[in-house]
Amino acid sequence: MTRAYFNHKAAIWDETISEKDTAKLMGMVKRLNIAPGSAVLDVGTGTGVLLPFLLGEVGEDGSVIALDYAGEMLRKARAKGFDGNVDYLCADVTNIPLREGIFDIAVCYSSFPHFQDKLVALIEINRVLKLAGRLVICHTAARHVINGIHRQIPALTNDTIPGKEEMCSMLAAAGFTDVELDDDGKSYFCCARKLGLEKLEVLGLKLKADVQSFYRVSKRSY
């Protein structure tokens, strides 16, 4: 249902729904601290609202993969002809058809609430990140504003941002650490880092057990 909703809205997305304040978008991207030459995964790129800003940060030596599961949204993004090293991938975030450990940072801008299985999505994002790679979940509005808007749209009623405790638990279960979450009433910014090799070796099977346990408890919520 959500995929159909976004495909239907693609033609009017930029004019009626997407963030139009370029200063907010630029400010959000600057908070990502993307180093020149980085490999970036833009998860849920939509019509490519964030793409020109991401491409500006990675520079000539960097790259961006724009991923979205709504083909019409992705086609609109591609048609904009952004300058830079960008490729487009139509796929579900729970099953990314790419090899593991290739991205320095994965950015979920205005997309995380729409992941139908959030834990599985986080695990899959973790897989394609390099060791100590970063994940950022962000919005140019606060959590309560985003959730309030979605609850008024029949197709998006369940597409919400979890509370801080639940979000931190999911990130930990998916193999992330060093979580920083800032929901200041004006924007939402959650950053986490993929566990380094030394921590993965120490955790061993415990991480797998935590993931399985969390999923059994939480899967009915998503």
Image (cartoon, rainbow, N blue to C red):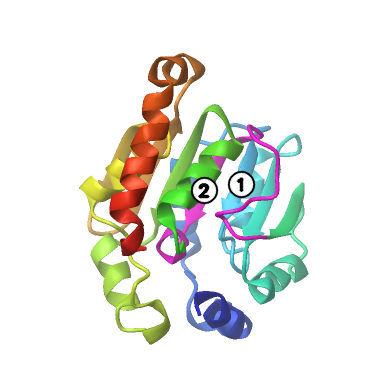
Residue 199's x, y, as percent?
42, 18
Give above or below for 145 relative to 211.
Answer: below
Residue 41: mark: 1
Residue 107: mark: 2
Residue 188's x, y, as percent?
33, 54
> Decide: marks 1, 2 in contact (CB < 8 A)?
yes
* Between 93 and 79, the one nearer to me in the picture: 93
- Give the class, few, some or many, for how many residues have Cα within 10 Å of label 2's Cα (few <14, many ≥20): many
Q: Is residue 21 left or right of residue 101?
A: left
Please identify the quarter of the rendering in which residue 127 is found.
top right
Residue at 54%, 45% in the rendered image: 124
Magenta region:
91-114
Residue 118's x, y, as percent?
42, 55
- Dot 1 or dot 2, earlier in sequence: 1
Please identify the quarter of the rendering in which residue 147 is found.
bottom left
Question: SS for tag 2?
Answer: strand
Question: SS for tag 1?
Answer: strand
Give above or below for 185 relative to 6.
Answer: above
Give above or below for 198 relative to 110.
Answer: above
Q: Is residue 48 magenta?
A: no
Q: Please state which amino acid type lies under the numbered disc 1.
A: Leu
Residue at 61%, 42% in the rendered image: 57
Give above or below for 26 relative to 18.
Answer: above
Q: How many marks?
A: 2
Q: Is residue 108 magenta?
A: yes
